[in-house]
Each structure stands twice: as structure tokens, then as C-alpha cells.
Amino acid sequence: MPRVRKGAARNQARKRVLRRARGYFGANGRHMARAKDALIRAGVYAYRDRRARKRDLRRLWITRITAACRMRGTRYSLFMNGLKLGNVALNRKMLSQIAIDDPRVFDELVTIAVEASAATPANAE
């Protein structure tokens, strides 16, 4: 049986890999084997960092809310607990946007949270 070489399919696969690796440093963007390895590694980093981005943004939102709470004389944990007790269902992203864009509304939220936490018997001091 004659030997069959892949021809067009192999060229297309090579083009596809090298096109995805375009712009990589040195041989990683030019040589097939190095480009394959670089793409695998890039995919691993991309997968990991899509999840890390969510963590980083949540940390940023919490930091912003904490700063806004401290300016109003309360703590982040008391504020969040008070919102929960006051049945205010806003996520941290929205709370941080409100703290930046509309400080008066955030003042009202702090008031609601403080009153709700003061009304519970466990927090009465």
C-alpha cells in the first residue's frame, strides 16, 4: 500500500496553530511544536484567570464599600448584615457603584442598615 502524506490537512492544521500563536515571543510564534506548547500554556492561564478576575473584582467592590462605610462611621460587616436584616437585596457590584455615583442614596442605605441591625435583640448593647 502506498504511503499517504496528509498534504492539505497538515498545512491547514499548521496554519491554524500558527495563526493562533501570532504575536508570541520568539520561536513560540513561528515553530509548530513551540507554538503548540505555547497555546496550551496560554489556554491554561486564560482558564485560570477568567476565574481569578471574578475574585479580583469582588475584592475591589468590597474595598470600595468598606471605604464608603468608614466615611459614614460604620463597618463593612455591620453594613452588610444590616442590609440583610433590612431586606435590601443589592449585590456588592451595585453597592460599590452606588457608593461612587450617588453618595446620598448610599447614605440612606447606611441608615437603613444601621437601624435594621440596631432593631435586632442580638445586637442590642
Image (cartoon, rainbow, N blue to C red):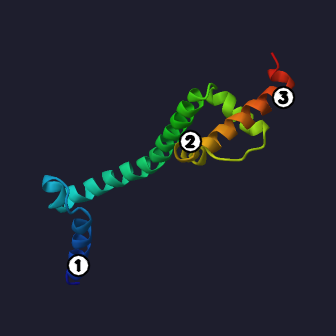
Which label was assigned to residue 38? none
Q: Regarding mark 2 in the picture, which secondary structure is present there?
A: helix
Residue at 16% of width from left, 53% of height from top? 25
Residue with the mark numbered 2: 99
Give, as a three-letter code, the residue at label 3: Ala
Quarter the N terminus occupies: bottom left
Whole-angstrom CA distance, mark 1 to mark 3, is: 76 Å
Residue 28 place in picture, x, y as percent: 18, 55
Residue 103 pos. (x, y %): 58, 41
For disc 1, the marked residue is 6
Tags 2 and 3 in contact by the CB under 8 Å rule?
no
Q: CA distance from mark 2 to mark 1?
A: 61 Å
Q: How far from the left and from the top, in percent, is residue 113?
A: 73, 34
Question: Which label sits in the foreground, 2 or 1?
Answer: 2
What's the residue type where badge 2 is placed? Ala
Q: Residues within 10 Å of mark 1 (few under 14, many from 20)?
A: few
Where is 94 relative to 82, above or below?
A: below
Farthest residue to the front: give it.
Answer: 104
Crowding at dot 2, Cα within 10 Å, few <14 / some 14-19 / many 20+, comes out as many
Disc nearer the start of the sequence (2/1) = 1
Q: Is residue 61 left or right of residue 87?
A: left
For marks 1 and 3 on the same chain, the one whose residue lies earlier in the sequence: 1
Q: Is residue 71 above or below residue 28?
A: above
Q: Quadrant of the C terminus?
A: top right
The one nearer the camera, 69 or 40, is: 69
Please indicate whether residue 9 sits to the left or right of residue 90 in the image: left
Q: Which residue is mark 3?
A: 119
Q: N-terminal of the two: label 2 or label 3?
A: 2
| Farthest-out residue, bottom | 1
- Element at label 1: loop
Task: Residue at 13% x, 53% y: name it.
Answer: 26
Query: Which of the 4 quarters of the picture holds residue 114?
Result: top right
